[in-house]
Amino acid sequence: MIASSVLLVALNLAISQNGEPQSNEQILDRAQAAFQLGVKLRGTPEESKHFQLAADHYEQLRRRSLQSPALFLNLGNAYLLAGDIPEAILTYRRGLQLNPNNLEMRANLAYARDQVVYSSPDSFARPPESLWPPWLPRWTPGMSLGATFLFYAISWIGLAHRMAFRPGSSPWLPGIGAAGVLCFAIVFFFQMRAEKTEAEHPAVVISADQTYLHKGNHSLYSRAYDMALNRGVEARLLQVRGDWLQIELTGGQVGWVSRKKAIVDLP
Amino acid sequence: MQIANCKLQIEETLISVLPAGRRYASAPASSNLQFAICNLQFAILFALFFSLSSLRAQAAEPDRPQAPLVGRQEPFCGAVGSGRFKVTTTATPAELQAGDPIRLTIRIESVGAWQRAPERPDLQRKPEYARFREKFHVANDAERLSPQQGKWEFDFLLRPKNERVREVPPLYIVYFRPGLTPPEKGYMTTSAPAIALKVRPRAKVAVNEIQGNIEPALPPDRLYEIVTGPEVLQRESKSFPNGWLLLLLVFGPPALSVGWFAWYTRRNPDAARRHRLQKSRAGRQALQALQSLHAAEPSEAARRVAGIIAGYLRHRFNLETVMQPAALGINHETDRLSSDQRTRLAELLEKCDSVRYAPPPAPSHQRLTSEATDLILDWESQP
């Protein structure tokens, strides 16, 4: 009985809208065809429909647990050209988590953020400006781990060299190795802690204009701030209670927002 | 009385100091020091005047009734008076397009005696005036103050944010009337009624009315490019080394280092022994010094070999006596050396002497250097 139910669910998942099972390649072909059609109709009101269709197909692939920076780049572009800024921002952020050094995706995310209309001229609800130079590759946890093991190997090589050739000399090579191991291990630790925090508090993007933060998880609660949030404003999730999300804006402002007015970066 | 005395003192100081300052300033041969003193006196005068004015202000404070902080009601406008205050508002124009400005004038009028004048109602920040900010963009404008007549007028420029705005909200202000007990009962609220407005949507601009040649911002071309091919369908994830790879990374470098060291010592036993035996600083320095003797003259080299050996023994075994070959056999300090080592040392020193004092052409000293090196390595191998 259970096995047949599981089989039925699996079949339902595999069968497409027109009733035919679709492979990933077929969905990808359809997405690319819709996108190319949108490109041909560039500058006309019809283009957004095709880009939305392409985005739907790419989204279908993403829901099949396919994850690649290329897929997220295509999906983000399709969303952005279809006018769905919140989904585009969230998609680019997902892609950058996979590959933080994808410059094209970073530039597109910056363009999408430029399209967001902020209700306040100050820094309220704006994403923080990165001080990292754009030409400098982002230092990822994998790089830190690799550097840690590299310096670990250097310290052992230095130790063997000293024992073989210079028994009484000062251990500068093992010392450099040990210092490198310590430095990069600390960096790796903090990077992993930041990733853990990010996983515990996923990104939230406001999906409706004129959204206000409330002091509680109901619209009857008074507004936490007078300033409204528009589509594309980014925040992070603190907790979920019913249909309401408690979010924290980039400036530390906390409030509740209806789930219908925000999208959450959940797998 | 105290204030009057203080003022008198300041005036006396002024009279006594000012001529002196003028005298310094007008003196033809005044020095920099005199100018500095003059300036210091003027600074003291200014400070005295400021302190006088602050004293007067402090003395005047008790006369004015203070609105109590405890129990203060908002939006308090700062007005204090035993009479009452009346507030009226006017807005012009009453009919406009969304986004166009309305001049809102708030007039606060005192009916009866007043002690503190009202301040401009803070429509831009006070939470009690949030309804204004929801409907309008608020900016302060001119103000006309007539304290003698007990009238204060404050102008604001309000811009309706959309055509759904129907009125300027009613305005509430709070003032304080002293003399009641408890004092917080003296907070009085007065209000002006809402003003009806007719806000039209903004007139749409026809295409032929558009002026200027600013083109709408188009998405950049890179957005219209997508990645094709099998890389789109990959399943990538942030992967870190799994258990086996992690074990390899942790234990690989030490295992490789130890293995290489074992291989090296087996393959090059002499070199390995030599390097291993260089454990004492004295031995290392002596060996380095011996290696540098290749280019020296034979007699000079022999002299230096003897010196190097003596220095090495002095540091390694704390032998204080300068050894002579003939004395080695009876010197009690050399007891720590074995008989074989003593014999070899004596022979080496004798050879050094023979090379040093041999008639020219002097024999080669290379053998001396190698014998000295072997001797030091032999000593170094001792525990």
Image (cartoon, coloured by chain):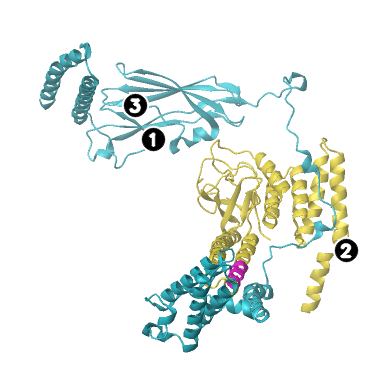
For label 2, the crowd category at 10 Å Cα-Cα, with few meaning under 14, some 14 to 19 and many 20 or more, is some
In the rendering, which numbered label is found on residue A21?
Answer: 2
Q: Nearer the viewer, mark 2 or mark 3?
A: 2
User: Badge 1 is on which residue?
Assistant: B75
Q: Is residue B79 above or below residue A11?
A: above
Q: Chain of mark 1?
A: B
Q: Chain of mark 2?
A: A
Whichever of labels 1 and 3 marks the residue nearer the N terminus, that label is: 1
Q: Chain of mark 3?
A: B
Q: Quadrant of residue B30?
A: top left
Residue A158 included in the magenta stretch of the image:
yes
**Measuring 68% from the left and 23% from the top, which residue is drawn there?**
B203
Q: CA distance from mark 1 to mark 2?
A: 67 Å
Residue A257 included in the magenta stretch of the image:
no
In the rendering, at what x and y percent does residue B36 appear? Answer: 24, 22
Left/right of residue B380 with respect to residue A259 in the rendered view: left
Q: Looking at the picture, tell me which residue is in the foreground, B77 or B377.
A: B377
Q: Is residue A169 above or below residue B116?
A: below
Q: Amino acid at mark 2?
A: Pro
**Marks 2 and 1: in contact by CB < 8 Å?**
no
Left/right of residue A106 with respect to residue A190 in the rendered view: right
User: Badge 3 is on which residue?
Assistant: B118
Query: What span is in magenta?
Result: A152-161
**Marks 3 and 1: in contact by CB < 8 Å?**
no
Q: Is residue B19 above or below residue A3?
A: above
Which secondary structure is most common in the magenta stretch?
helix
